[in-house]
Amino acid sequence: MKKDYDFVIIGSGFGGSVSALRLAEKGYSVLVIEKGKRYEKDDFAKTNWNIKRWLWLPFLKCYGIMKMSFYRHITIISGVGVGGGSLVYANTLPKPEKAFFNQGSWANLADWEKELEPHYETCWKMLGATENPKLGAADLALKKLAGQLGKEKDFSPTKVAVYFGKPDETVPDPYFNGKGPYRSSCAFCGGCMTGCRHNAKNSLDKNYLYLAEKLGVTVLAEHKAVDVLPAGNEGENGYEIVFRKSTSFFPEKKVVKTKGVIFSAGVLGTVPLLLKLKNGNLKNLSHKVGDMIMTNNEALILNTTYRKNSPDYSEGIAIGSILKVDENSHVEPVRYGNGSGFWRVSMTPMISESRPLLRLAKFVVTPFADLKNWIKVWFTPDFAKHTPILLFMQHIESTLKFRKGLLRMKTKIEQGKAPTAFIPEAHNFAKMFSELIGAKPQVIFTESISGIPSTAHILGGACMGKTKNEGVIDPKNRVFGYKNMYVFDGSMISANPGVNPSLSIAAITERGMSFIPPKKDFEK
């Protein structure tokens, strides 16, 4: 079978971009297929009210960088576009605590903390990670609360992928000896998660993917892989990748031939495709596909102030600080830029009650207990300016399953404790934070009304295992049952990191890529 490329990578996020560069450096020809659009700095939305440029809703011709997916047991926020989640994420690159490396399906398959240490360092360097030099109002409030709780030593500025430089400065590439693009200094506008319009955010299209394209990697935006056909029982003779345009209502299917394939489309891209292929052309896939879906045990709580003279909480970078609350939990204050108040349309009072009828009663009664201040919250003129968001994360295990449905995936509760919208530690912390700044805590309506939790960091579904009966991929990220097939994205993460996972996805990919030989040796 004539091969068009040595490798086809499905997805361009933290797994796909790292893979593209490292394979190109080894001499392989590479095609990256990305569902979303390519965005330059002036293409991003000024505020998140510009739905067409912020949200991914193809059926409404909205081709933005963020997608919201609603399931029976979870609401998921994810990224779309050339550069994947790096376009919409909050730049934050924390290394997980020790517990992450010693639990889940990958435990004991390697000394993960030791083996990944040099790869974390590589990723920090590649992504231009540096400590946030400027704490905003929400960060200072978190620091004050940490002091009141006796946790001053557990508070710190975040390590972030941002070029700070000098104010209003534009410079030649400061990271790769001039091989990268020009960069401009951060304006601390809080707009990181609607897309950086100042060319300061070190998203993947500014480093890994940029350098990969300079080495000849082809990035095909606005296309989606829909099928993979192996040549030979285990793909030993290569694969055909079937794909189509993602921004067209009546797309024509196209085919490309390749020696190897890498799934890097994130949990919401890789897992449904693998579930489809398990029942179709890749029947040798493990029955573990779709198992051990993790939410990072998260809570997203918005705290809108009602005080007249409150500071501007929109100033700063998206996440400027982090606090280790206890041995299992971290919390970060999150911000959107001035004017980005779209979330207000989906917010309802935070109700700390898991029982449905009692929760509904509290939902009705809560505003009347302090109606004057709730009215101020509901009618605040600039929602982003008055609303710091708390992102609460835990590495405690709680899992779901994804299974193939009639039109889309469906969720099931896996054995053990299901993810919950009512994490006591998160709600208690949010109440203390809101009291400190004079605010009311709110959550997305699916939590208060139906009890369905939300996450910005969905993980798992193609986890590691010692054998095919224990996982979808082996410790080198090779898919069980097939040759030259890999998974490098959030679906490979095999335990809850309890912090933002982007750095870990990149580091595990760097490690996996180190096992693939140069093309000249591969062909021997």
Image (cartoon, grey):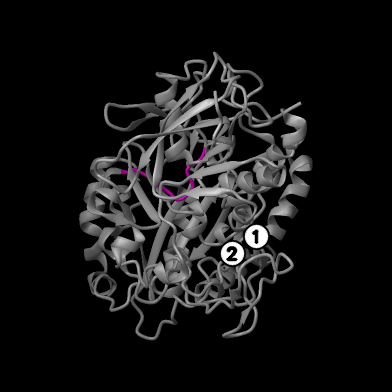
- The relative height of residue 50 versus residue 119 in the rendered view (above or below) is below
The image quarter in which residue 347 lies: bottom left
The image quarter in which residue 521 lies: top right
The residue positioned farthest toward the top in the image shown: 233
Q: Which residue appears at 29% of the width and 56% of the height?
A: 62
Give residue 513's position: percent from left, percent from top.
69, 39
Position of residue 205 in the picture relative to residue 44 (left or right): right
Query: What kind of residue is marked 2?
Result: Asn
Q: Which residue is mark 2?
A: 202
Q: Main secondary structure of the magenta part?
A: loop
Numbered label tally: 2
Q: Which residue is mark 1?
A: 127
Secondary structure, mark 2, is loop
Q: In the rendered structure, does residue 458 fall within the stretch colored magenta?
A: yes
The span shown in magenta is 451-459
Q: Which residue appears at 56% of the width and 75% of the height?
A: 140
- The relative height of residue 355 versus residue 338 in the rendered view (above or below) is above
Asked whether the beta carbons under mark 2 and mark 1 sit within 8 Å of each other, the answer is: yes
Q: Is residue 193 visible?
A: yes
